[in-house]
Amino acid sequence: MAKKYILTIDEGTTSARAILFNHDGMPVSIAQNEFNQYYPYPGWIEQDPKEIWATTTEVINKCKKQAGVDDDDILAVGITNQRETCVVWDKETGVPVYNAIVWGDNRQEIVDGYNAMRADGYEEVLKEKTGLVCDPEFSALKVKWILDNVEETRYRAKQGELYYGNIDCWILWNLTRGKAHKTDYSNASRTALFNIKTLDWDQELLDKFDIPREMMPEVCDSMGNFGEVHMGTTFQKPLPITAILGDQMAATFGQACFEEGDCKMTFGTAGVFDSIIGNEPKKSESGLLTSIAWGIDGKITYLFEGVVMNSGSTIQYLRDEMRFLEGTSDSEFFAKKAKMPRGTAYFLPMFSGVGAPYWDANAKGALFGLTRGIDKNDIILAALDSLGYQTRDMVDATMRDTGKPITILKIDGGAAKNDLIAQFNADICGIDVDRPTSVEMTAAGAAFMAGLAVDFWTSFDDIKKARESEKIFKPEMPEAQKEKLYAGWMNCINTLKVWGEGTQEIRKKYGDD
């Protein structure tokens, strides 16, 4: 019998990937191409949806070709994606009316819009309905910005001529040649427009943001029938699309975090911590978000989530903007050459504002403790350690919310390959850190779910068996040293908040020019 595979289309923030997984849950072929990021003004981040789709078709063809796999060998397709990035397009022609506005976009109009909602006391309403906070990461005000600023789009949207969707929805619509305008519960729960209790687009929120319901996609279980791929140059067979999951929910599923209390940290472009909380939504009192992990056979699983805007992108910053590194993989080598002890300098990579659990879009990144003795190696070490401090922020917040200890944290994402980062996470959090054999957990999660839908795998136990540990990092740092370092980090966070408040006051007094 010929070998069979599941194909995952993994739409990241900076690249599109296609990955074929075998029955052991291992990637047998990976193709990846980057697409452009556009920064028209300070804080703005945009992408070309047409380029994203073209890049996607390129990597699918490349992935199949390099593995010698044809469509008869592929049982199903799963999609996972950067979540809050939004696209508005013509439902007949498929032409986007504007660039995709990326989840990390921090344009001032949107920041001010959420600040105004918070000042009006509306954040509690948003939390109650969506589990989210007033932050520019989420899709609602991005969609509103497009409707407000692109000529005739609001009128056309009300006439039913336009579709809105995040990247999963855009890719699905193109894969099916316009036959499916759908999303799943995990992606819908990140829009700030979806009620995670009623499991429907919330009319009050649609009215609040002035977004016509006619634009909105159908929301479905994460595992199910999303349609079939269109036959053409990329596919020669109508393969079923059987799973859609937001990237962090896919990583959570891929890490086999199925039980209440299971948690993972993904070190991607952003750093995202997720902890399963069960089949009922719970409100965080510690600055975490409540989102839908997935829906399977009508059963909803919820999670707490903490997002920091810059994680792996911190290392890219050291490489691209600071020119400290030739490649991101060099970071561990140079960090180990640092001369100053940890805690001398702190690097806060808040390039797009402070995320969970503090949520301050006004604050920006900083380097604390700078002296003439600090060299580039010390800064690189401080930057790598920032990933651990941010993990600790969210581990502590989760334990406060649940009242239960966390004893093991599963990690994935590109930066998880760095032993220094993995060990410092174990040390500063005081818990075991479990790194899997393959850190491609986001793509694996979408593949596992798509494969379950077609009986390629038959149970969650099969997924647990497929997810193998490569190494367990155990905490080695003395308790007093750990707490002293973290106290230094918190001192920096509190100082950054003051700077952010001051910056806001300066803007109010003198304007943006």
Image (cartoon, rainbow, N blue to C red):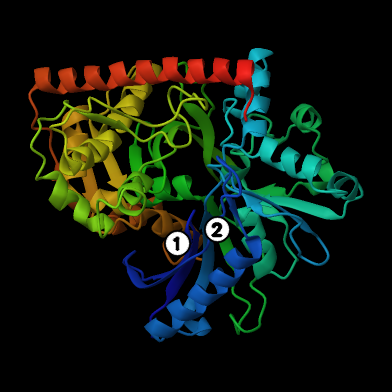
- Decide: is 386 above or below 315: above
| Residue at position x 34%, y 40% in the image | 264
Q: Foreground residue, 388 or 224?
A: 388
Residue corresponding to mark 1 = 447
Q: Quadrant of residue 103?
A: top right
Measured from the top left, where is residue 201 in percent x and y?
A: 73, 37
The image shows a total of numbered marks equal to 2
Q: In the displayed structure, would residue 393 be above or below residue 218? A: above
Residue position marked by numbered label 2 in the rendering? 243
* Element at label 1: helix
* 10 to the left or right of 87: left
For label 1, count other residues whose C-alpha is less than 10 Å away and answer few (under 14), some (14-19) or many (20+).
many
Residue 495 vertical position relative to residue 51 in the rendered view, above or below: above
Quadrant location of the N terminus in the rendered image: bottom left
The amino acid on which the numbered mark 1 sits, given as a three-letter code, is: Ala
Residue 123 visible to the viewer: no
Residue type, mark 2 in image:
Ala
